Image (cartoon, grey):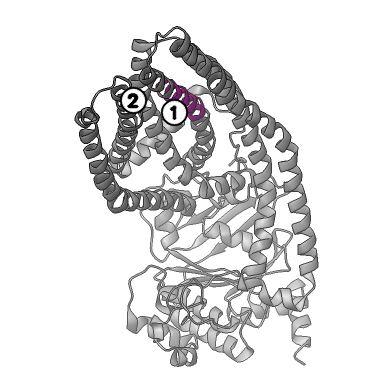
């Protein structure tokens, strides 16, 4: 089997036009599938508001000027004024209600669905992907930025359609009245587009450089506000190191921003000059005044209507030049989102074999190397584990114990050799189905911000009698008695002031209950008693024996008093099994296991 391939992000600094359109269609299609009503309402509301503004601010005022200019009675404005006023008031009432009562709620629904899609993908990703910094950088971008940019694509699309509508109305009026204004619009448009494209490209270059640096500062921020690190911060002197790291990352981020600041400033400055000052407030206004005051070919009402129409035409066409780079900018984020969503798992999940019951394991010449690692972590492991066996994996740090149990859980596949379960390779079974057979207590287990019951059942149906029995057997009774709501008491104070924070030993008992409550046939326990006192450890071992007598158990432990309950002990060193046997057999052999056990036993004499 080949080694894991490293994730290759899309490093193209600027998506092609075709790819930009493809990314934006992807975003719009996603939004349409979630809520077509939201898309249509957003589009119609924007078009309507702009058309009404044109009617009110350009044509109504121009008509009023014309009535005054021609010396007609004041009442002549009413045939135009009253209908326009009625339309404006009606739109304010109707679309304000739509904005408050529908669009805001619909946007929250859309945002939720976008987030859930990302969460589901993240939950199903191979562990190997998280070992790859390139993937993780793009994953951070996708999780933090992409959902907002999907919604911004809709905003930009609605703006584009609205702008096209306004351009058709105003452009038609200018062409019919005095088409010379189109020359001024064209000059402004070309110059603004050039500077806008350069500015957006420079901005994205800055962000590409800044994001990886800011991740370090974000990590340090978490260290200072998460309770997990509070004791270590107060009992050690690591804060000075973190302060230095924070200063260094902030200096690098500031250096990145400063390096791009001057080019961004000048690009923005020249773009502003080309957009308004030279073509319109100077040249075009001079032309209109000349036509009105000198040649008399334009009336004052026509001057006003032309200036407002051409100004609107220029503004909207310029807005198109900004929208096009905006689509490109959104596409850069959505490209990362698509790459993330379309990244295929390296673990094959094509197995269809029926999962056996009461099955054992057989490992044949299993080797494994993490992505980009220069050396194998596991080196030719061959062993057999019958169903119901109690297996201990022991060895010094870095021996490969945790890596081996990750292969049993099929978080990774071996790079060479194979693991068989019930006589067939693990890949022969559906991945989700196989993992339901396995329950694991990780060394770095987490207590989630939920109730005691939810922390144990972890999504399985609640059987209260069974839950209480398991909690009793792991010694959680005393804790449960003092909890105000029993098994329904919220844990941690993340969201509930009434939440309870457990001690290390209490939390470990709850995590053990989580494994024992499951219906899994294989239990994997990584340092299950590390936070327990010797008496609690003894009781736990007895409980595991009783509750899991018919289950296969693999446990890792540095406390070798726990390994005495194992049927077979595998001693690992440098990714290889160097000894195996029962506790008594290995002690009698006088090898590495006996040496490790005797060193620990010496502490209790």
Residue 122 percent location from the top left of the image: 49, 51
Residue 260 percent location from the top left of the image: 71, 36
Q: Identify the residue position indicated by label 1 in the image.
A: 22
Above/below status of 53 relative to 466: above
458 or 314, which is in the foreground?
314
Instruction: Indicate left or right for 254 with 31 as reference.
Output: right
Q: Residues within 10 Å of mark 1 (few under 14, many from 20)?
A: some
318 or 122, which is in the foreground?
318
In terms of sequence position, does the residue under pointer 2 or pointer 1 come before the other? Answer: 1
- Tell me the distance, in whole angstroms, between the alpha carbons under discs 2 and 1: 48 Å
Callouts 2 and 1 close, C-beta under 8 Å = no
- State the quadrant of the N terminus: top right
Going 63% across and 50% down the picture, which residue do you hit? 131
Query: Which SS does the magenta portion mostly show?
Result: helix
Instruction: Indicate left or right for 86 with 148 as reference.
Output: left
- Quarter of the image where one finds residue 359: bottom left
- Quarter of the image where one finds residue 311: top left
Going 73% across and 66% down the picture, which residue do you hit? 397
Magenta-colored stretch includes residue 323: yes
Instruction: Indicate left or right for 484 with 126 as reference.
Output: left
Q: Which mark is residue 65?
A: 2
- State the quadrant of the C terminus: bottom right
Magenta-colored stretch includes residue 184: no
- In what element is the residue under mark 1? helix
Residue 198 percent location from the top left of the image: 62, 26
- Quarter of the image where one finds residue 201: top right
- In what element is the residue under mark 2? helix
Highlighted range, magenta: 309-324
Going 73% across and 34% down the picture, which residue do you hit? 262
């Amino acid at each position: 089997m080949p080694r894991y391939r490293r994730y290759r992000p899309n490093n193209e600094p600027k998506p092609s036009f075709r790819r930009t359109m493809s990314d934006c269609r992807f975003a719009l299609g996603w939004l349409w599938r979630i809520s077509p009503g939201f898309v249509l309402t957003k589009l119609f509301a924007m078009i309507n508001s702009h058309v009404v503004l044109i009617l009110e601010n350009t044509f109504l005022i121009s008509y009023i000027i014309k009535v005054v200019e021609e010396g007609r009675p004041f009442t002549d404005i009413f045939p135009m004024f009253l209908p326009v006023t009625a339309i404006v008031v009606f739109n304010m009432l109707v679309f304000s209600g739509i904005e408050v009562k529908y669009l805001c709620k619909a946007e929250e629904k859309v945002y939720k669905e976008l987030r859930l899609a990302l969460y589901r993908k993240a939950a199903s990703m191979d562990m190997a992907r998280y070992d790859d910094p390139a993937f993780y950088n793009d994953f951070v971008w996708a999780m933090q930025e992409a959902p907002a940019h999907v919604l911004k694509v809709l905003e930009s699309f609605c703006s584009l359609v609205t702008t096209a509508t306004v351009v058709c109305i105003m452009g038609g009026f200018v062409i019919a009245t005095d088409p010379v204004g189109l020359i001024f619009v064209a000059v402004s448009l070309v110059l603004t587009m050039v500077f806008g494209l350069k500015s957006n490209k420079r901005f994205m270059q800055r962000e590409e450089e800044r994001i990886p640096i800011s991740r370090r500062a974000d990590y340090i921020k978490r260290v200072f506000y998460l309770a997990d690190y509070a004791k270590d911060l107060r009992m050690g002197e690591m804060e000075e190191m973190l302060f230095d790291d924070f200063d260094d990352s902030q200096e690098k981020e500031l250096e990145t921003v400063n390096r791009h600041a001057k080019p961004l400033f000048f690009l923005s400055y020249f773009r502003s000059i080309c957009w308004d000052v030279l073509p319109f407030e100077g040249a075009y206004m001079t032309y209109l005044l000349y036509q009105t005051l000198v040649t008399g070919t334009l009336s004052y009402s026509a001057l006003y209507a032309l200036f407002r129409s051409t100004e609107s035409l220029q503004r909207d066409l310029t807005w198109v030049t900004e929208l096009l780079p905006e689509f490109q900018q959104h596409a850069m984020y959505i490209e990362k989102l698509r790459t993330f969503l379309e990244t295929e798992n390296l673990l094959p999940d094509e197995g269809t074999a029926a999962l056996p019951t009461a099955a054992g394991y057989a490992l044949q010449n299993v080797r494994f190397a993490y992505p980009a690692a220069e050396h194998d972590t596991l080196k030719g492991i061959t062993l057999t584990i019958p169903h119901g066996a109690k297996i201990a994996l022991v060895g010094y740090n870095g021996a490969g114990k945790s890596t081996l149990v990750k292969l049993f859980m099929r978080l990774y596949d071996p790079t060479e050799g194979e693991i068989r379960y019930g006589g067939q390779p693990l890949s022969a079974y559906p991945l989700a189905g196989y993992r339901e057979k396995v329950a694991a207590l990780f060394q770095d287990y987490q207590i989630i911000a939920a109730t005691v019951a939810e922390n144990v059942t972890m999504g399985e149906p609640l059987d209260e009698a069974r839950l209480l029995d398991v909690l009793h057997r792991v010694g959680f009774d005393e804790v449960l008695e003092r909890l105000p709501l029993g098994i329904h008491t919220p844990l941690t104070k993340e969201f509930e002031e009434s939440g309870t924070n457990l001690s290390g030993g209490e939390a470990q008992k709850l995590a053990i209950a989580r494994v024992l409550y499951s219906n899994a046939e294989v239990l994997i326990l990584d340092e299950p008693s590390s936070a327990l006192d010797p008496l609690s450890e003894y009781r736990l071992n007895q409980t595991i024996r009783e509750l899991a007598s018919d289950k296969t158990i693999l446990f890792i432990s540095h406390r070798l008093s726990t390994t005495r309950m194992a049927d077979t002990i595998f001693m690992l060193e440098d990714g290889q099994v160097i000894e195996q046997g029962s506790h008594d057999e290995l002690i009698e052999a006088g090898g590495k296991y006996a040496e490790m056990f005797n060193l620990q036993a010496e502490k209790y004499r």
